[in-house]
Amino acid sequence: MRVLVVDDEIAITDLLADVLSDEGYEVAKAHDGRTALAMLRDGLRPQVIITDLMMPNLDGIALYHAIRDEFPDAQIGVILMSAGKQTRVQDSRVVFLPKPFSIMDLLDAIERLA
């Protein structure tokens, strides 16, 4: 399964990518929403996108809306993660994970969306 990890904190992106790769996932990385959206426009089709909410150059919620607007038929699950206030999105293909979270919580969220 292909997963796209999007976070402006490089250490978090790299850590999540390493953990998910060790679990057998094919992982792509982006360090802001604009880059992630460009990757999708270029043809990347992950089954799940894990994105931080607060990022420069297109935050996580704006990325979510862009994905739903530009790729309405794509069955892409989105995990929104944040250390701040929880954001509610009325979409069964979205899971919110508050930071900090366990690796098991992350893997469970991916499996629910897959």
Image (tube, rainbow, N blue to C red):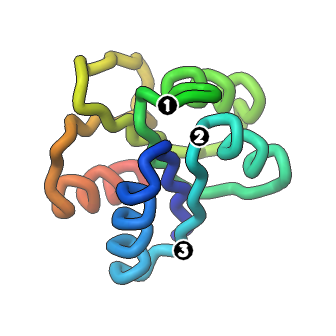
Of badges 3 and 2, the one in the foreground is 2
Between discs 3 and 2, the one toward the N terminus = 3
The residue pinned by badge 1 equals 55
- Residue at 43%, 68% in the rendered image: 17
Q: In which quarter of the image is residue 35?
A: top right
Contact between marks 3 and 2 (CB within 8 A): the answer is no
Please state the horizontal and vertical placement of residue 111, each as a whole percent of the image.
Answer: 33, 59
- Where is residue 7 drawn, in percent x and y? 47, 45
What amino acid is labelled 2 in the image?
Asp
Dot 2 and dot 1 residues touching (CB under 8 Å): yes
**Residue 26 spot, x, y in % from top left:** 54, 74
Q: Between 90 and 20, which is closer to the camera in this rendering?
A: 20
Residue linked to disc 3: 26
Q: Name the residue under label 2.
A: 32
Instruction: Look at the numbered disc 2 and give the secondary structure of its residue.
Output: loop
Compared across the picture, whether 97 is left or right of 64 comes to: left
Tell me which residue sits at (52%, 61%) in the image. 3
Q: Dot 2: few (<14), some (14–19), or many (≥20) neighbours within 10 Å?
A: many
Q: Which amino acid does label 3 sit on?
A: Glu
